[in-house]
Image (cartoon, coloured by chain):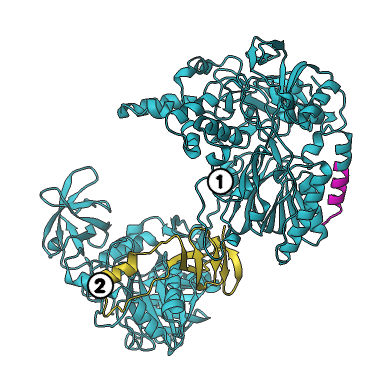
Chain colours: A yellow, B cyan
Amino acid sequence: MLLLPCPWCGRRNADEFGYVGEVVARPDPAATTPEEWRGYLYLRANRADWTTERWFHRMGCRRYFTVDRHRTSGEVRR
Amino acid sequence: MRLDPQPGEVIDRSRRLRFTWNGRPFEGYAGDTIASALAAAGVRVFSRSLKYHRPRGLLTASFHDPNCLVQVGDEPNVRAAHRLLADGMEVRAQNVWPSLRRDLKAANDRIGRFLPSGFYYKTFMRPRRLWPVYERVLRRYAPGGSVPRSAPPATGWATKRFVHADVLVAGGGPAGIAAATAAARAGARVLLVEEEHHLGGHLRWGGEAELARLRELRTALAAEPGVETLTDAVAIGRYDDNGVGVVHRDPDGAERLVKARARVLVVAAGLIERPYVIEGNDLPGVMLSTAARRLANLYAVKPGDRAVVLTANPDGDAAIADLKRIGVDVAHVEDARLGGDLHRILGGGFVGGGGRRTVRGVELPDGRRIDCDLVVTATGWTASTALLDMAAEPAKLSGAYRAPTRNAPDNSVGYDPIAARFRPDPDRLPDSVLAAGGVVGDGSTEDLVEHGAAIGEEAARRARGGSARRAPVLGVEEHAELFQGRTHGIVDHAEDVSSKDLVGAVREGYGAIELAKRYTTATMGPTQGKLESVNTVAIVAAATGRSIAETGRTTSRPPYAPVTLGALAGPHREPVRRSPMQSWHEAHGATPLVAGQWIRPDHYGDPAAEARHVRERVGIIDVTPIGKLDLRGPDVPRLLELVYVNKWSKLPVGKVRYGVMCAEDGVVLDDGVVGRLDTEHYLMSTTSSGADRVAEWLELWLQTERPAWRVHVTPMTTAYASINVAGPYARDLLRRLVDGIDLDPEAFGYMAVRTGRLAGVDDCVVWRIGFTGELSYELHVPSGFGPHVWETLLERGEDLDVAPFGIEAQRILRLEKGHLIVGQDTDGLTRGHAAGLAGLVKLDKADFSGRPELAWEAAFDHPRLVGLRPADASTVPHEGCQLIDEAGRIRGRITSSRMSPTLGRAICLAQVDADLAEPGTEVRVRLVDGDTAAAVVTEHLAAVDPEGSRLRV
């Protein structure tokens, strides 16, 4: 199981965390189009490469944070 | 036959144990395994093989022996050559019917040529409609024992344990012991894991010199307090960041999953002896040299009377010496180093006790036949690299990522033709993993100990954060590439796969090793390749004309050894939350209802009467599970504007407002009320099941999209006990408890909130809302005082006929009032307008969660939430019933339905298509029994008091 670097608690077991997902930019809701907004809702690159992800330390300090994780190796860097 | 005491024996001859084998009484000694005790009593057949039901005897006489899985009491699939004998054990053979001796399914062996690989795939596919019949028949042929019916098992639920070690050493042979000792000496906290019952590896069944060295190693280890040793413990897998799963079995039989996290893992798993593939190699009486030596030296069991030995290495020579020493007639030795070989092994007759076909002799390449009842082979080794193969290897990936190649998933283990086995390249392992001893290379006992110690020291250094130094190396000796002889034999004893099956698979086009594996199931049984993977690869390589290195290996995945599901599952824990008043409810006849995490009173006997009582008099209900979040800070109004669809900026102090949250896709997420207690202090309520979700949702916005906003969110659900006082006499009742709160309707109107003292309890929050449709006050009191306030309400309201009501009455009341429940009257697709909340969604706000979707939803047709009045007032359609049109198409569904005690007729809420939402529209409800019933859309969601006059008194 992965260890994830929580900014408060340090490296902890991945099962303490909730996986939020790839970080995607939120479009301006006043000016967005259905295509753009639904891309924000549903489309993820899911590349076998470095990806910026958001995690939530649910069983710990309840901090949301982002890490860069390699989707194939699991390697994590802040 | 039991021998005279042997120098390295592990049995205690002073303690005799009685047990039964297939109902017959047997005796053994403490320290015996089930298999060694049976072997000592002359038993040679332990099981029938998976497909052909051929009799099988001991092959490795170790933890990994594929031929002696047995049923012990109600525990199936016990490794008889590993499990220690206990007094009174009832042991039975598995996979036999009606008995081990006379197994009718052995007919499979005679029709074996009709059971080629792929037989099941090819035969039972067509015609498809017959599959249920095939399935019933095949199930009888499924191998394995019978699962216990009792729960929990006799040994109790398996528990779990976490270990954080500096260094975890997997394997307690000479290298592993030395590594653990050296690492501990260098200051590391060490966990040493050994699958067998004793440390020492192959030294245990060695001669005087090995036993003496082993005593020294054990003494040195025992002097290191920094080492915890687990025996009868298997490291089942290496996962990311050196997470190592270990299944540990206590002497009393309880299993425990140890979740270990090691800074550095030292794999000292050693070598596993490899069977030789020739005809007859699965007959009872054919065993590996290590098996013969284990039986003789550890358990003082004579494995046969007259032996033929095929040896290609010093261990085979040592086995010959051991056999001679214990009085076995070694009739013939073939030395593979001098070109010796066996042509095939002959079986038959009733040699020995308890089996039909055992070894009768061998045929040599020159055609000579030699009688014997024991064939011992020592043809080579497999390095136990599984733990090295598993998990991704982040340390090597910095910079450009190197994709795993198909046949070498990790690149750190490759085929070495000199050593005739797959071997790790220590330089290509990640820095957090080291390999020690036999898994790396060959050497004398001293070489292995020295290597282990050097690796242990390096592991401790790396665990302290020292940069990796190159791991010391261990050389290899030359081994012959002996895999298969001149005849076909069994490759995978556990799965009953022969070399002929593998060649056939290649001929059918399954030449890639991963395909040959899946098509034949070779390496897919309980041994998981430990005995048979090198032979499998070699035979496929020969059949395809490729080299072994080109053919590659199959992928090793966890678990390394079979694990009981019970060990992984562990105890069943589902904690239930209880309000502080729950004991009172139980003492007063409440029927419990498990709702999400909470246990709550469903009713106290008659929910309809409870509902009527609220309409006519006054009732109190425990609503503690309602989610409560304390919000503080100057930016709370902005947060509320963002997460709710309606407006919040002008909510004054002392007022409460209802709000609905939608997710970014516009789907209704939660609802509740928020009261402004002070300028920068709010209390938010959520649905009972949504409290955690909403807290995370608010934090997500505050921590990611709006980090500059100053808001503190504190979950308060269990800090308050919550009581709703509802009914026409609610104010009269509450007046008797409040101290300093003016309940006058002018001073404390509908949707207002006050804080103060209740029944002598400070810091209470009271808000006036109306989920039930009656005049009602919701009290939030510090949870410890919940029972006090609850009982005070009942005491002081006695003359008002105050009575408790449960969840069911509340559901009736809210349905009469047409108040929706998120998740019941909405589902995962219901957006704001479809939930009947069009009036609430304020699209003139520039931004809020889900705004774009709600704007688009408003412009198009969308389903509606409506009230329904069934034509037959006495029949309540079930929740979930479909609404259909003339053509039978589904046009909606009933989301909530109850018999209304107030109106004396059935009432419903329903989701319907937009064109059916007009009041007065007739719809047809398809009932559970298939009949249809008529119903009409009502003008309001509320069936009782749609104007809300009862709330505002």
Whether residue B665 is visible to the viewer of this picture, yes or no, is no
**Residue on which the image places disc 1:** B557
**Residue on which the image places disc 2:** B854
Image mark 2: chain? B
Whether residue B745 is visible to the viewer of this picture, yes or no, is yes
Side (left or right) of B890 relative to B54? left
Q: Where is the C terminus of chain B found, in terms of image quarters?
A: bottom left
Side (left or right) of B134 relative to B247? left
**Would you call the spot at circle 1 few (<14 residues within 10 Å), some (14-19), or many (20 or more)?**
some
* B864 drawn magenta: no
Q: Position of residue A52 (x, y in %)?
A: 46, 69
Side (left or right) of B950 relative to B251? left
Q: Position of residue B99 (x, y in %)?
A: 58, 18
Quick one: SS at disc 1?
A: loop
Q: Write down the region rendered in magenta.
A: B214-226
Residue found at x 42% / y 70%: A23
Mark 1 or mark 2, whichever is nearer to me: 1
Q: Confirm whether circles 1 and 2 share one chain.
A: yes
* B216 drawn magenta: yes
Quick one: SS at disc 2?
A: helix
- Marks 2 and 1: in contact by CB < 8 Å? no
> Does B631 sit above or below residue B434?
below
Q: Where is the N terminus of chain B found, in terms of image quarters?
A: top right
Residue found at x 73% / y 32%: B86
* Amino acid carrying mark 1 in the image: Arg
